[in-house]
């Protein structure tokens, strides 16, 4: 580095002339004289020399660094604001939302049988509870809104009770684990916010959280060992265009979970855990479950299963450093119920809440899977002994809510009027 560059560097760093002189081995007067000479060199009428070019290069570097610093500061401020926003909203929920009344019932008597005590695991994923799908937009395949979401949630609750209390009488169910795998609300991603049921994702998060809290409140009566809700965040409820891997709580899924926890604060039989991580590990009867939404896995030719298998193997490698391993991997995101052996364990994938949605149908030509969530029976000795698919859509009940719901896929005959109904959608009737 030349003397001139050292002097300019010291000025940029806001050093005194004395400090600069000490670093370059010159007196204060000598530094001033050199600065005067350098200033004269900036006169474009003088002949160019290497020193002049070095000064201009340093000036360019200073401008670039200054702009980069300003950009980093703006991003940091935005990140701090996002972090503060969700934490403050969660605090408002805790301070303002009234818990449900303390349960007054006695625990339901467990079924008598010799099958032994077992636990249950329920996957609750990709509800998109505020999404609005019309018959027109889905070619008659689906009608969905918040009221339909509530109907399917009630059916899921009733089927869990039916299976654990009546259809498997040989087993005594002790605990229920509810794994919330993200995307409880449709969120603002893909510019969907204004078109969702509430037109406001915060209101949607509170409404969905309230509905799910009431479901869990009822279920807690049937599991004397307690209900444990573990929630991770999905991709739809985030606000940023890109995923912030340091901010899993900067997400409306976190507010849904906070609403559930607040509403059930008086229920001593329910525990809600919302880890500040995109992946959660839960141990049940000595076996480890790894929970993740699954949005970071990219499909190969539209098929994600190879990607999930690779991810599961990498997770096992990480866990091996802590002398442990995962027995079960649980994901959502792809709206396709699936199960396959992977990485020495089993990979479970949660099904959809809607038969189709406009994004998957139009962009990827995908859909047509019956709305399904999965209930697992977990034995202390053998692990998962029974996966139970629960079909959440009752077409007869939903057609009673929307009588003009099409019976045929995308077939429109003799349409004469579009009759608005008292609902969140407009239904076209022949």
Image: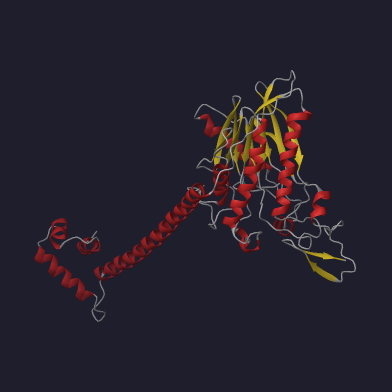
Say left or right for 191 vs 413. Answer: left
Relative to residue 228, is residue 18 depicted above or below? below
155 or 27, nearer to the observer:
155
- Give the image's coloring scheme: secondary structure
Tell me, yes or no, if residue 373 can be seen here: no
Residue drawn at x 71%, y 50% is 149
Relative to residue 267, is residue 65 depicted above or below? below
Tell me, yes or no, if residue 208 can be seen here: yes
Counting every numbered tag in the picture gives: 0
Relative to residue 291, is residue 251 depicted above or below? below
67 or 135, nearer to the observer:
135
Relative to residue 354, is residue 291 depicted above or below? above
308 or 2, nearer to the observer:
308
Percent position of residue 1, x then y = 24, 58
Percent position of residue 144, x then y = 74, 55
Say left or right for 313 vs 354. Answer: left
Percent position of residue 365, x then y = 75, 56
* Image quadrant assignment for residue 382: top right
Residue drawn at x 16%, y 60% is 20
Percent position of residue 141, x then y = 80, 56
Say left or right for 407 vs 128. Answer: right
* Image quadrant assignment for residue 362: bottom right
Of all residues shown, which one is farthest toward the top?
A: 114
Of all residues shown, which one is farthest toward the right?
A: 414
Of all residues shown, which one is farthest toward the bottom?
A: 45
Query: Image quadrant for the C terminus?
Result: bottom right
């Amino acid at each position: 580095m030349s003397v001139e560059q050292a002097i300019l560097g010291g000025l940029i760093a806001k050093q005194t002339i004395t400090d600069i002189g000490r670093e370059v081995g010159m007196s204060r007067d000598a530094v001033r004289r050199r600065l005067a000479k350098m200033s004269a060199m900036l006169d474009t009428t003088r002949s160019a020399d290497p020193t002049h070019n070095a000064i201009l290069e340093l000036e360019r570097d200073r401008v670039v660094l200054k702009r980069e610093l300003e950009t980093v500061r703006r991003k940091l401020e935005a990140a701090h604001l996002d972090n503060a926003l969700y934490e403050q909203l969660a605090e408002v929920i805790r301070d303002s939302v009234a818990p449900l009344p303390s349960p007054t019932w006695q625990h339901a008597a467990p079924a008598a049988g010799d099958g032994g005590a077992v636990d249950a695991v329920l996957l609750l994923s990709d509800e998109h509870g505020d999404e609005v799908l019309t018959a027109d937009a889905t070619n008659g395949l689906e009608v969905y809104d918040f009221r339909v979401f509530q109907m399917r949630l009630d059916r899921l609750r009733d089927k869990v009770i039916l299976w654990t209390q009546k259809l498997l009488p040989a087993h005594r169910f002790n605990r229920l684990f509810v794994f919330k795998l993200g995307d409880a609300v449709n969120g603002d991603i893909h510019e969907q916010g204004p078109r969702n049921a509430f037109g406001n994702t915060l209101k949607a998060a509170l409404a969905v959280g309230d509905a799910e809290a009431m479901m869990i409140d009822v279920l807690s009566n049937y599991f004397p060992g307690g209900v444990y809700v573990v929630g991770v965040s999905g991709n739809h409820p985030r606000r940023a265009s890109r995923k912030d891997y340091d901010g899993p709580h900067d997400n409306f899924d976190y507010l849904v979970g906070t609403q559930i926890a607040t509403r059930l604060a008086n229920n001593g039989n329910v525990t809600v855990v919302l880890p500040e991580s995109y992946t959660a590990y839960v141990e049940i009867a000595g076996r480890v479950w790894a929970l993740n939404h699954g949005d970071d896995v990219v499909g190969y030719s539209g098929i994600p299963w190879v990607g999930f298998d690779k991810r599961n193997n990498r997770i096992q490698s990480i866990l091996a450093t802590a002398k442990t391993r995962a027995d079960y991997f649980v994901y959502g995101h792809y709206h396709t119920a699936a199960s396959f052996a992977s990485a020495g364990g089993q990979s479970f994938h949660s099904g959809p809440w809607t038969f189709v949605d406009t994004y998957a149908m139009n962009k990827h030509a995908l859909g047509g899977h019956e709305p399904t969530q999965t209930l697992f029976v977990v034995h202390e000795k053998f692990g998962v002994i029974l996966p139970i698919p629960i079909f959440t859509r009752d077409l007869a009940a939903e057609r009673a809510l929307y009588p003009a719901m099409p019976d045929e896929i995308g077939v429109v005959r003799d349409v004469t009027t579009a009759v608005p109904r008292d609902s969140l959608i407009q239904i076209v009737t022949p």
